[in-house]
Image (cartoon, rainbow, N blue to C red):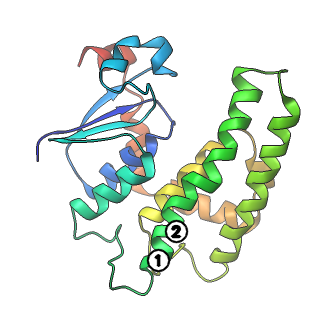
Amino acid sequence: MGEIELWHCPDARSFRPLWALEELGLEYRLHLLPFPPRVREPAYLEVNPLGTIPAMRDGGTFMTESAAIVQYLATRYGPSDLAVGADDAAYGAWLNWLHFGEATLTFPQTLVLRYRQFEPGKAEVVADDYAQWFLSRLRHVDRALAKGDWLCAGRFTAADISVGYALLLARQLKLDAKFSPAIQAYWTRVSERPAFKAAKAAQKMDLSEALRS
């Protein structure tokens, strides 16, 4: 294992691994980039030919999927309460929520982001449809929270990082006005965590300084 490096755009999907790094108390080197980096920082394509965010390098390991990076960090650098063991009854729920946050909650929001912020007026009906899709899937989180403060295992885990980021994105897209009281309270719990605040602070460093690192 070598130095952990994370390529990140403020409040992009890469916030998930940044938050996980802070929760785990790991040392890392942060490369802060303007969004979208494949357009605004073409040299990034030498790091990640896909041009997507995040990218993480840990020694000989290179990864580009945000939920997978969170899972990797939680299990590779354990034991940690962020992970749920394979012998735990909550293991399946943990994996499901971890990937639900990206595949089910973040995906539809990327289309809202595209057609409301980057290409406004081009496909407003698509943006509206996918906003409603996101909100309908969010009801599944509501049902889970009826059983406790966190999504699974009776504690904050990497699954909450994954789903918590989807709520952060929803707030950026102004979809949070339709959060239920339970979802809003959950958002307050995750966003008040010291590691969440530390990740927010880390991404505020000056971009020109970050690009020289």
Q: Which residue is mark 2?
A: 96
- Distance (Cα) linking label 1 and label 2: 6 Å
Identify the residue at image location x=53%, y=66%: 97
Local packing at callout 1 (Cα closer than 10 Å; few below 14, some 14-19, many 20+) is some
Left or right of residue 166, residue 12 in this image: left
Q: Which of the image's four quarters has the C terminus? A: top left
- Helix, strand or loop status at disc 2: helix
Local packing at callout 2 (Cα closer than 10 Å; few below 14, some 14-19, many 20+) is few
Q: Position of residue 106 (x, y in %)?
A: 61, 48
Q: Which residue is mark 1?
A: 92
Identify the residue at image location x=78%, y=52%: 133
The quadrant holding residue 123 is top right
Q: Position of residue 208 (x, y in %)?
A: 35, 13
Image position of 66 with respect to 87: above or below: above
Image position of 174 with respect to 166: above or below: above
Identify the residue at image location x=44%, y=25%: 51
Left or right of residue 6, residue 116 in this image: right
Q: Residue furthest front?
A: 49
Identify the residue at image location x=56%, y=75%: 149
The quadrant holding residue 7 is top left
Q: Position of residue 44 (x, y in %)?
A: 35, 19
User: Looking at the image, can residue 109 be seen?
Assistant: yes
Image position of 20 with respect to 204: above or below: below
The quadrant holding residue 126 is top right
Q: Residue furthest left?
A: 1
User: Looking at the image, can residue 192 be seen?
Assistant: no
Q: Amino acid at mark 2?
A: Asn
Q: Amino acid at mark 1?
A: Gly
- Helix, strand or loop status at disc 1: helix
Q: Position of residue 8 (x, y in %)?
A: 40, 32
Label 1 with label 2: CB-CB less than 8 Å: yes
